[in-house]
Every structure is written in C-alpha cells, then in structure tokens.
Image (cartoon, helix red, strand yellow):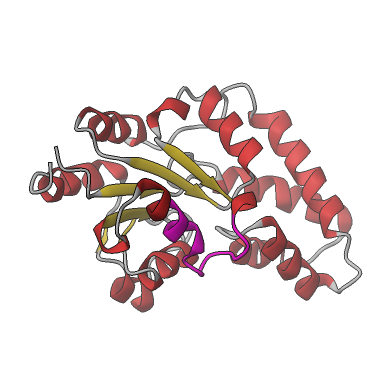
Amino acid sequence: MNNKTAVLFDMDGVIFDSERAQMAIWLGLAAQEGLSDMEAVYHRCIGVTMEATGKILREAYGESFPWQDFRRRTTEGYLSRYAGGRLPVKPGARELLASLRAKGVPLALASSTQGELVRQWLSEAGLLTCFDLLVTGDMVSRSKPDPEIFLKACALLHVKPEDAWVIEDSYNGVRAAFAGGMHALMVPDMLPPDAEMEQKAEQIFPSLWEVGAYLEMVLSREF
C-alpha cells in the first residue's frame, strides 16, 4: 500500500452542517445586543481561528467590543442546542470517511475550531476514530487563508503538500489549500463559488457524494 497520499478535511460546513446553526446563534445574540450587519461579519469569520475572529469583531464593532464574552455566549448557546450528538452530519460524510478508511488512506481533520470542541463534536457523532490526527485552531498561530494548518497536517502525516487533497467549503479554506500547494476540493456550503474559487479549487462539487466518486477515481492510482 502506498501511503504517500492523504485527505484533509475541514470540519464546520464539511463534516457537520454547523455553519448555519452557528450563524443562527450569532444573529440571535446580535439582535439582543443591537449589533448590525452580523450576518456579513459572521461570513468573514468562517474558517478562521478564535484570535482572527476577535480581530474581525473588533474591526466591525470597535476596539472595545467585548468579543471574548460574545464568543463565550454564542458558544454556550450553540452547545446548549446541539451538544449530545444533535449536531447534524453532512450527507455523505460518514460514507466518505468509511470508504477512505477502508482503503487505508491517511486522514486528518484540519479545523480552526478549538481542539476541545473538535474532539467533543467528533466523539459525540461517533467520528473521532475516523481520523489519524487532528490539527486544530489552538495548534497554529496563523489563520486560514494562511496554509499553516494544512501544512502542519501534512508534516505530521509525512505527506508532501502536493500529494494532499483538501476538502473545504469556505473561501478561506480553499485559499489556504491553494496557497499550500495542495489539491483543493470545494463543497460550497453557505456561500456559492465565485470566479476566484473556480480558479483556485481543483474541482467544485455539490455534495460529498460526488467527492467520494472523484476520490475513488483519483486514489485508485495511488492505493
């Protein structure tokens, strides 16, 4: 078996149908606090680290904005609603992971979300053991679109970046994979692909079902 090829997954919007769920929590709190344009601000925060999220929130609402308290409250609301295995898994995710595991393909999850939450969501969904390793937001210093998180995953898997396939839903995720010299596969979630995504993503798919068929073809040459 050739272990020179790996598949890297983002989590929110790829494994879990979580980004719309998170946005609903953010918008609800924004309405309570009288914060305008929160949907646009939320879109800018998709796929970035907690520190980058704080920067975006301060840019939008002022340097004195208590962004850590805002994040704490939105996280508490999100956990209250979706913890305990209630967070919906994206169609085709379980099947794709099972198929790749059966083929012996090295798998990593590279998510900007904090490690404790990543492990919780994956464990509650019964997906934690699907991955050979997790690289999370608290393990890197630079946020997507910087490729650091994907490059770290490749290094830990002992895989060259050009031999890694990255499954992403967000603009910043695709930018990061492209910047790192990886094969970016986009499955759009909240935002449709634009001209930049069409140029930087190697392929764009409507769902993970199509990703599975594509990787079956591609990886048959490797495994």
Q: Nearest the camera: 82 or 98?
A: 98
Decide if residue 210 is on the left or right side of residue 89. left
Decide if residue 26 is on the left or right side of residue 175. right
Queried whether the magenta region covers residue 16, the answer comes back as no
- Residue 49 image point, x, y percent: 63, 58
Residue appearing at x 13%, y 51% in the figure: 218
Residue appearing at x 81%, y 45% in the figure: 72
Queried whether the magenta region covers residue 141, the answer comes back as yes
Q: Which residues are magenta?
A: 140-153
Can residue 117 be seen? yes
Q: Quadrant of residue 59?
A: bottom right
- Residue 199 image point, x, y percent: 29, 76
- Residue 39 image point, x, y percent: 65, 62
Q: Quadrant of residue 94?
A: top left
- Extreme left residue here? 221
Residue appearing at x 74%, y 42% in the figure: 75
- Residue 67 image point, x, y percent: 82, 59
Can residue 31 be seen? no
Q: Quadrant of the C terminus?
A: top left
